[in-house]
Image (tube, rainbow, N blue to C red):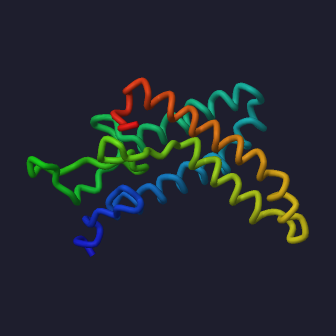
Amino acid sequence: MSEWLQTYNEWFGMYHAGIITSIFGAFAVTFTVLMSWPKLVKDFGPIGGFMAAAVIIGTFWLVNHKLPGFGFSTGLLNDANGLPMQFSMIHQGNRGSAPWVDMGWAIAMGFILSDVLCAPKGTRVGLLKEAFPRWIVIILGGIVGGIFVGLTGYTNAAL
């Protein structure tokens, strides 16, 4: 099992351990947002929304993106110098041109899946048809934003 987790998956651009932790990290932040954010807004009004943004998103940003000394480490792989590599829950790509996963995308996909699965059976197709044009615009906006960030050289992406 450990050998399989240490295998690099060219199609996804990350190791299998990174794929698993990305899925779990995306689920964990989305689940927490769905369960906690509405309750905080209901109890505290607009201030509850700010509290949720700070506490939920801030905490999961630390856990999912691994600032030095915070977050989780799978400890399964070694880098080029033979030292253990540190991984975040949501994998940011270990090669210069590897794409990174944003928590906003994770939460958005979780909300879409939740809305579709929780909708009454007769309305699911209608919800998908209504949302599809918005998804296209959102995806195109993400691509354009990624291009601008890549052009700044901030990501070391080879564009």
Q: In this view, does 111 lie to the left or right of 146?
A: right
Q: Quadrant of the N terminus?
A: bottom left
Nearer-the-camera pick, 77 or 52 = 77
- In the figure, is residue 120 to the left or right of 94? right
Where is residue 133? Give x, y as percent: 78, 48
Q: Position of residue 135 (x, y in %)?
A: 71, 48
Q: Which residue is drawn at 39% across and 45% down?
A: 92
Task: Estimate the x, y position of residue 96 in percent, counting from the top left.
Answer: 31, 41
How many marks the image carries: the answer is 0
Between 94 and 157, the one nearer to me in the picture: 157
Residue, x 58% and y 41% (percent of image)? 104
List the single residue furthest toward the bottom: 1
* Image quadrant where residue 137 sits: top right
The residue sitting at 73% across, 43% down in the picture is 38
Residue 30 vs residue 159, the one in the foreground: 159
Depicted 133 relative to depicted 157: above or below: below
Residue 81 position (above or below residue 21): above
- Residue located 52% across and 53% down the image: 26
Nearest to the observer: residue 102 or residue 37: 102
Q: In which quarter of the image is the C terminus?
A: top left
Query: In the picture provided, is 85 more to the left or to the right than 150?
Result: left
What x and y, as percent, mark residue 79? 16, 50
- What is the residue that sits farthest to the left in this orientation? 81
Residue found at the far right of this picture: 122
